[in-house]
Amino acid sequence: MEKLLRRIVSDPHVMAGKPVIRGTRITVDTILELLASGMKPEDIAEDYNISLDDIRAALLYAAKILGKEEIIIETRA
């Protein structure tokens, strides 16, 4: 799985340092938003000229980042 993460890079000169798919200007958050909107991974890969492994890498990256965050959920009394 760590091999997938090598597909994600961050460069302050590319997309203001947001994590992107290596060799592109396609951000991880763009991929996540497209998936959340219901777009199929195969269609994203075709439309943005990236691979399915790039999409998996974006998902893995997001999971790793979120796994380190503390989330506070409001509970109703």
Image (cartoon, rainbow, N blue to C red):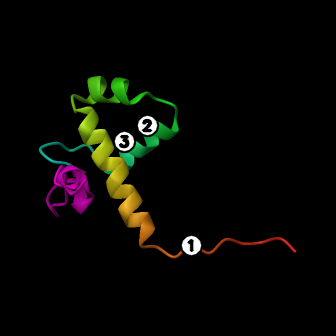
SS for dot 3: helix
Tell us which disc is closer to us: 1 or 2: 1
The quarter of the displayed image where residue 76 is located? bottom right
Which residues are drawn in magenta? Answer: 1-20
Within 10 angstroms of label 3, few (less than 14), some, or many (20 or more) residues? many
Q: Which residue is rendered at x = 36% and y = 63% of the image? A: 64
Along the line of sight, the residue nearer the viewer: 11 or 1: 1
Within 10 angstroms of label 2, few (less than 14), some, or many (20 or more) residues? some
Disc nearer the start of the sequence (1/3): 3
Is residue 40 located in the magenta-colored stretch of the structure? no
Q: Quadrant of the C terminus?
A: bottom right
Labels 2 & 3 near each other (Cβ < 8 A): yes
Tell us which disc is closer to us: 1 or 3: 1
**Residue 36 position within the rendered picture, expressed as x and y whole percent measured from the top left:** 51, 40
The quarter of the displayed image where residue 12 is located? bottom left
Q: Which amino acid does label 1 sit on?
A: Ile
Task: Give the answer, above or below, for where 68 lies relative to 26.
Answer: below
